[in-house]
Image (tube, helix red, strand yellow):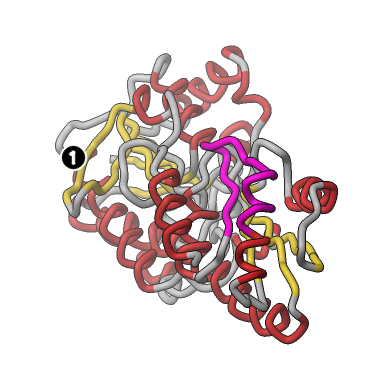
Amino acid sequence: MKIGVLCSGGDAPGMNPCLRAIIRAAEKYNDNVVGIRRGYQGIFKEDFWGGVDRKIDPREVSGLTNKGGAFLNSSRCKEMYDEEGVKKAVQILEDHCFDALIPIGGNGTLSGARDIGKFWDGQIIGLPGTIDNDLLGTDYTIGFATAVQTGVDAVDKLRDTAGSHDMMFLVEVMGRHCGDLAAYIALAGGCEVVAIPETTTSIERIVADLRRFKALGKRSIIMIVAEGDSLGGSSEVMTALKEKGCPFEMRNVVLGHVQRGGSPCPADRVLATKLGCFAVDALHQGETGKMAGMVSGQFVLTPLDEVVQGHRRVAEEVEKLIDRMSI
């Protein structure tokens, strides 16, 4: 079987060990795994790792377990946004005799995979590679645990400064549609307040809580703000807090793309390896048009149509737990 593998969209820690797992798992079947560089853009440009018929040797992916970024590079591809572009991609895959495709990425990547499946007879098994943890069909996405760790490391350092100056920090993290990253960082970092896309942020309620914290003698406050919050990013939230009489001196910090980088943590390495192997096995069991994930510790295959129809909504429960801890 000739399998094309690509990474698309924002890079996520764990994409590299996932690629390593795919290539080494495929050896069991004597598959020819071809690397497609820079995501779907690599299909249109026919940009393949070492050539369209060149199999990636298992030795070439040695040492990728602890490497961040995307070995095959990644990108976003505008040509995949319309049907004619998708059909062109399908034609290129057919011209080069691909039998299967394993795309690693988030919602946009898997939406593209679903669209390709509408016009292509080849098999497709997608893998959830995104720090946002926003995909249906899996409890955790590849890269999420590392991004949480990166955020908590930043919060721990900011807490030292906040405590030294009786200050409040607003820390903006990624998450346009899903607040999992913000909520988990806030919970693990012992933060007092979190603002997520799933709920409407009440400045009046937050200011009331902050005044109560001040009266209790709290000397430092950390608030995590998801970039997709109803009020906007941390800058907009800070302005609104000032207007309503926030009792603390404030600073805002935007973590930005630092959340995407770094060596994947053990949890992401294990998840990436398990799902990479599972995806290859699924192809050889005749599966297609699905995403490989893990739910309650069990491997699952979820139709791509279901995966991309919405976003996970578990951050609300975590937000309630954060409120209980902030006394």
> What residue span does the magenta drawing correspond to?
193-209
Residue 219 located left or right of residue 15: right
- From the image, tell me which residue sits under label 1: 284
The answer to whether residue 139 is seen in the rendering is: yes
Give 211 or 93, whichever is nearer the viewer: 211
Give 65 or 27, whichever is nearer the viewer: 65
Query: How many C-alpha atoms fall within 10 Å of the one at disc 1: few (<14), some, or many (≥20)?
Result: few
Give 173 or 1, whichever is nearer the viewer: 173
Q: Quadrant of residue 64?
A: bottom left
* 208 vs 45: above or below: below
- Percent x, y of residue 29: 19, 50
Q: Amino acid at mark 1?
A: His
The answer to whether residue 53 is seen in the rendering is: no
Local SS, label 1: helix
Give 255 or 83, whichever is nearer the viewer: 255
- Percent x, y of residue 198: 52, 37
Magenta stretch encompasses residue 195 = yes
Residue 211 located left or right of residue 292: right
Q: Quadrant of the N terminus?
A: top left
- Percent x, y of residue 141: 40, 51
